[in-house]
């Protein structure tokens, strides 16, 4: 427990008892956490469906939580636990979690990302051509979801067209059930998601069985990163087609798809809503090549070569992080920002609230990407989580976002269609309610 020179404060609590009304507010009110932080402080406890849950925000509380990693463990709501599966990395803790994380992490090393770069660029160009040739307004968010799924399924895991397309529809169904009420009644999103999970696992197992057969026969695996994964599994003594591996791929497909699609939609929406900042970014982009030089995709638009793009991405993910928070469970008492939190409490670190928590003079409610260039911002950034459970696909998501942003903004001029609802639905990840309808036109080729 972090040392403190003063006695710990008692944990503030809301008056909620059963937590039914609190749970409804949690799902329906985008200001749920902010309102309670303003009333109870940066660490408070409430009840969600009978579960005592501690919410926290701010740099001090975040640092304290990460410093006491051995006193907490990963935790997810029941719907997420069931749909991810008991073998999933997300549901593991301790040494077991760390060992599996090292194996799966081989898919996201710098060497692996360099391998994926050309495929991502090709998919960006395909999307740009699709938008350019539409000839009418298009709903962009679903196309970005398909793009993000193609990147993780095709580029990383090497799935072929038929496997990929059969997976996509089931993934949409499965995703909708992740944060639904865990009532498996016929026709509910949760029940549909459970059925979709069974089909997904069967299809992923078939893909891995084919890969295992190819490896046994000495044939090369399909394009993607399965060979990287296979090497680490050999060291761990697991066969490539093991049910354990199938559940890890299910998690990877979700982690590399849902949150990245959200980030892409929010990035383009925010820039289209802020034409001055878009013009400021375009001043940098016109000096950058598209496509990047072959096999240089990883560094072509990094923070050194494209500092304004880096600042814009950081600011968008600060204001609209792809995940609103993450959960832990206290195994023993902990101290968070000077507040005593008992054992056996679910802790929800509110990423969205933490991103907007800092010096009042900085106006952290405003979209101002320039704040990230001077190094003086007081904002704490955690769009991919943090600590030993930070998102494994962080580097891939950042690469994908940079490549799509440059490709789309260098090749196309996008305009928002009037009369649409641009407010964000926040579960499971932020996305414009009407799907982000835009018109796309090719930019002058002489600017390439």
Image (spheres, helix red, strand yellow):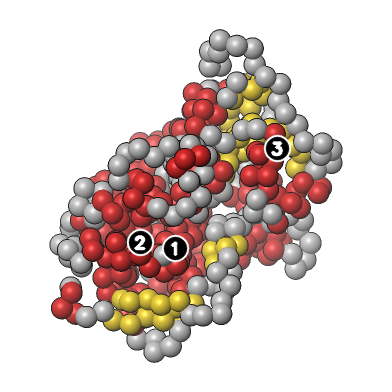
What percent of the width, then of the height, locates residue 389?
48, 37
Seen in the picture, residue 138 relative to 221 is either above or below; the reply is below
**Mark 3 — residue?**
39
Mark 3 and mark 1 in contact (Cβ < 8 Å)? no
Element type at marker 2? helix
Seen in the picture, residue 188 relative to 98 is either above or below; the reply is below
Q: Is residue 109 left or right of residue 96?
A: left
What percent of the width, then of the height, locates residue 250?
51, 54
Mark 3 and mark 2 in contact (Cβ < 8 Å)? no
Q: Earlier in the sequence, mark 1 or mark 2?
A: 1
Comparing 73 with 199, the one in front is: 73
Comparing 84 with 421, the one in front is: 421
Q: Which residue: 59% across, 69% down?
A: 433
* Residue 270 numbered mark, or none: 1
Q: Is residue 283 left or right of residue 15?
A: left
**Mark 2 — residue?**
277
Comparing 29 with 150, the one in front is: 29
Figure disc tally: 3
Q: Which residue: 54% across, 63% down?
A: 431
> Where is the C terminus found, in terms of image quarters?
bottom left
Q: CA distance from mark 2 to mark 3?
A: 34 Å
Element type at marker 1? helix
Residue 280 appears in the picture as rendered = yes
**Mark 3 Cα within 10 Å, few/some/many (few <14, many 20+)?**
few
Q: Which marked residue is nearer to the observer: mark 1 or mark 2?
A: 2
């Amino acid at each position: 427990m972090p040392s403190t020179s003063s006695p710990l404060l008692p944990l503030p609590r809301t008056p909620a008892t059963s937590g039914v009304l609190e749970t409804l507010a949690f799902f329906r009110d985008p200001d749920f956490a902010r309102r309670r932080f303003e009333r109870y402080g940066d660490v408070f406890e409430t009840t969600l469906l009978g579960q005592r849950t501690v919410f926290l925000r701010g740099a001090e509380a975040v640092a304290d939580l990460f410093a006491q990693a051995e006193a907490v463990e990963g935790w997810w709501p029941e719907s997420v636990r069931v749909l991810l599966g008991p073998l999933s990395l997300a549901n593991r803790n301790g040494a077991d979690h760390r060992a599996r994380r090292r194996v799966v992490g081989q898919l996201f090393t710098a060497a692996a990302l360099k391998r994926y770069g050309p495929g991502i660029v090709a998919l960006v160009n395909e999307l740009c051509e699709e938008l350019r040739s539409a000839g009418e307004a298009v709903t962009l968010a679903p196309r970005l979801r398909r793009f993000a799924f193609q990147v993780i399924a095709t580029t990383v895991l090497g799935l072929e067209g038929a496997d990929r397309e059969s997976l996509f529809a089931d993934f949409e169904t499965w995703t909708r059930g992740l944060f639904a009420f865990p009532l498996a009644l016929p026709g509910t999103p949760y029940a549909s998601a459970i059925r979709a999970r069974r089909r997904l696992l069967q299809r992923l197992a078939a893909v891995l069985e084919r890969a295992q057969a190819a490896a046994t026969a000495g044939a090369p695996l399909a394009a993607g990163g399965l060979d990287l994964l296979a090497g680490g599994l050999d060291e761990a003594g697991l066969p490539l087609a093991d049910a354990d591996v199938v559940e890890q791929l299910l998690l990877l497909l979700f982690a590399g798809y849902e949150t990245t699609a959200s980030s892409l939609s929010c990035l383009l929406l925010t820039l289209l809503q802020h034409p001055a900042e878009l013009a400021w970014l375009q001043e940098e982009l016109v000096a950058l090549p598209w496509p990047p030089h072959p096999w240089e995709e990883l560094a072509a638009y990094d923070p050194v070569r494209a500092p304004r793009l880096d600042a814009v991405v950081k600011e968008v993910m600060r204001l609209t992080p792809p995940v609103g928070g993450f959960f832990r469970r206290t195994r023993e008492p902990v101290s968070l920002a000077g507040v005593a939190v008992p054992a056996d409490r679910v802790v929800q670190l509110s990423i969205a609230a933490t991103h907007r928590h800092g010096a009042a003079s900085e106006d952290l409610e405003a979209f101002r990407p320039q704040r990230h260039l001077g190094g003086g911002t007081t904002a704490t950034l955690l769009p991919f989580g943090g600590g030993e459970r930070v998102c494994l696909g962080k580097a891939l998501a950042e690469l994908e976002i940079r490549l799509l942003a440059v490709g789309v903004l260098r090749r196309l001029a996008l305009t928002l269609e009037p009369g649409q609802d641009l407010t964000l639905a926040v579960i499971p990840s932020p996305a414009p309610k009407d799907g982000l309808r835009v018109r796309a036109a090719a930019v002058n080729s002489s600017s390439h």
